[in-house]
Image (cartoon, grey):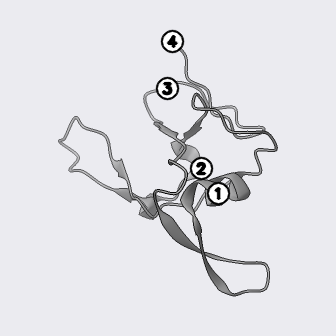
Amino acid sequence: MNHYCCVPRCLFWIKRVITFHIFPEQGKHQVSLINKFGQKERIDKRKAWILKLRIGKPVSKFMKVCSVHFAEEDYFHRSKDSKKRNILKKIAVHLNS
C-alpha cells in the first residue's frame, strides 16, 4: 500500500527517509500559535494543522502528512543505532507547506 502526503504540491510518497503522520484527534490536545495579530493563542491541535497546511478540503481519517513538513525540533530523536523511528512530539505544529 502506498502512502501519499495530503499537503498540496507535496511530491513525497512512501520512501525510507520520511515518515507519515495522521492528523490529531479533534479536541484531544491544545497548542499555542501566534495569530495574525502577533498574539499567542491556544487552539485545537487538529485545527492548527489544518490552518498551517492550507489543505482546502475536509480532512479524512485516511489523510497523512509526511515528515518533510515538520522541523527537526518537532521530534524526540532516538539513538543512531536504534531501528525505531523518531517520535513526533505532542506539541508539534511547525508545519512547513
In this rendering, the label closer to the viewer, 2 or 4? 4
**Which amino acid is tagged 2?**
His
Question: What is the C-alpha distance between the residues marked 2 and 4?
Answer: 21 Å
Dot 4: what SS? Answer: loop
The disc at residue 82 is: none
Are there few (<14), some (14-19), or many (20+) residues within 10 Å of tag 4? few
- Residue at 52% across / 69% down in the picture? 31
Whichever of labels 2 and 4 marks the residue nearer the N terminus, that label is: 4
Give residue 84's quadrant in the image.
top left
Q: Which residue is mark 3?
A: 15
Question: Which residue is painted at 30% across and 54% down in the image?
Answer: 77
Which circle marks residue 69 in the picture?
2
Q: Mark 1 and mark 4: span between their CA atoms? A: 28 Å
Asked if the residue under mark 4 is in contact with the one under mark 1, i.e. CB atoms within 8 Å, the reply is no
Tell me, for residue 47, which label it has, or none: 1
Which amino acid is tagged 1? Lys
Q: Which residue is mark 4?
A: 1
Residue 2 is situated, as x and y percent measured from the top left of the image, at: 55, 16
Q: Residue at x 51, y 44 (%)?
A: 67
Q: Earlier in the sequence, mark 2 or mark 1?
A: 1
Mark 1–mark 3 Cα distance, whole angstroms, equals 27 Å
